[in-house]
Image: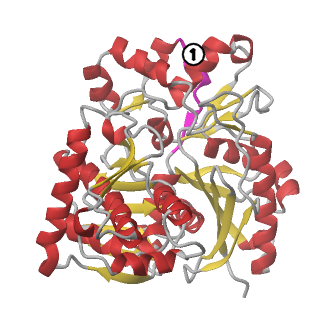
Amino acid sequence: MRRQYFLGIDLGSSSVKASLVDAETGKCAATTFYPEHEAPIIAVKSGWAEQDTDMWWENCKLCIKKVKEMANASAEDIKAIGISYQMHGLVCVDKDMKALRPAIIWCDSRAVPYGERAFNDLGADRCLGHLLNSPGNFTAAKLAWVKENEPELFSKIYKFMLPGDFIAMKLSGTINTTASGLSEGILWDFKERKTADFVLDYYGIDRKLVADIVPTFSVQCEVSAEAAAETGLQEGTPISYRAGDQPNNALSLNVFNPGEIASTAGTSGVVYGVLGKVAYDKKSRVNTFAHVNYTAETDRLGVLLCINGTGILNAWIRRNIAPEGISYTEMNDMAANVAIGSEGVSVIPFGNGAERVLENRETGCSVNGLNFNKHTKAHIIRAAQEGIVFSFCYGMEIMKKMGMDIRKIHAGRANMFLSHVFRNTLAGVSGAQIELYETDGSVGAAKGAGMGCGYYKDNNEAFTSLEKLAVINPDENHRSEYLEAYAEWKEKLEKML
């Protein structure tokens, strides 16, 4: 009897990744990504960031072909498809479903003034009460930029969509989106539980440009004959799950319920927690979106804290401070030989642009407390890792004030979570238990597809095979030392602010 698989596609800004998950065992049978080197980002002007949607689709097709070959899977073996994607992007297509321009992606900042103006004109109470966010630099504001600056092109738009909606469209010939997706574009009204018409009205955007809304877990559309010919998939295969990368990362770690937390610490760092009630930060230092299991009847909200200066700081330290040729593992060992608190050295890690958690201030990175007579490279390496953790905890204090009880953090065993210093400091300051797992976004999307098509009855069944690799408990013997080091770091940050 042949195996049955679910296909997960993860559209990132660096690459497209695809995985086949064995439906019965829940194990990943094959995974691959394209391109082998980082995908190009088009930056016509400073602060702009665009990508070619045809490039996404070509890389997607290459991934599907390769992952099928790796697993020796036929088209009929793939029973459902799930999609994860880079959040907050904008794709505009005409009535023939052709992209009218390159996608404006998540890190493009051109729409900042449009979001700020909307927040001021519509009013903080209305925006936060209905949208749970400032309109900010998200999808709606990016579309407003297109309307004002490219009016001829705007007049040709049949539908606008998020990056994951575009991939689903290419696979199926059907255009739709989700409430979770609209919420990340700041186009979902949480009070009215429908599309935020008042935002569309403010920007002068016709409602007919909004795609039809389908549930996150459902048969949203099916692979078309044309896409089957292009990809080698079977016509009629359901696309049954779709979510932005951070909600999907939480799903990948089986984070569904209030109080559960997912974290990543790559180039940037994320803490993503689930709330069971409508809440927001009045200063929009963290963002609240609809989680994958949000419905009209049940509030499941994802609160997103993003720290730009995370792994990129550790990489900078490796290139410029650490002994030449040293590995990250060796850096971690050096850091572990320094006492908690780095003997008075503090690193403020915000050197990768404006930080939302600091109300969009751009403070730059700074090193404080250096003593030339006792401090070494190892002290700076540890202080940098501690500074990243402390920035996480600074943001988590905001999340706690919103009602989130942070007792357990789920994370993939990757990037900064490979460091004993990083994870022990995070457990020590937050007081939370950390659980490390082996998973990724494309595997999570595949399991989401299994839930959406009804193969798995719920998330607990879908993630039975999720392997817990390690548990890190707070070190109560040194808790006071961690808290003291955090308090000193926080005092230095607040003086700077």
Q: Nearer the viewer, residue 35 or 369?
A: 369
Name which residue lies at 38% across and 33% down.
360
10 Å crowding of disc 1: few (<14), some (14-19), many (20+): few
Query: Where on the picture, by quarter, is residue 96?
Result: top right
Label 1 secondary element:
loop
Q: Nearer the viewer, residue 180 or 285?
A: 285
Measuring from the top left, give residue 387's x and y in whole percent. Answer: 32, 58
Query: Where on the picture, by quarter, is residue 333?
Result: bottom left
- Is 207 covered by the magenta stretch? yes
Whether residue 478 is visible, yes or no, is yes
Give the position of the C terminus as an image quadrant.
Answer: top left
Label 1 sits on what residue type? Asp
- Left or right of residue 362, residue 109 in this image: right
Measuring from the top left, give residue 75's x and y in whole percent. Answer: 79, 68
**What residue is shown with label 1?**
206
Whether residue 432 is visible, yes or no, is no
Name which residue lies at 30% across and 16% down.
123
164, above or below 25, in the image: above
Q: Nearer the viewer, residue 64 or 296?
A: 64
The way the protein has been coloured in the rendering is: secondary structure
Measuring from the top left, give residue 496's x and y in whole percent. Answer: 26, 39
**Given the current orientation, which residue lies at the most extreme right position?**
229
Measuring from the top left, give residue 232's x and y in whole percent. Answer: 84, 62
- Left or right of residue 51, residue 142 in this image: left
Q: Which residues are magenta?
A: 204-214
Give the position of the N terminus as an image quadrant.
Answer: bottom right
Q: Nearer the viewer, residue 104 or 38?
A: 38
- Left or right of residue 280, residue 32 in this image: right
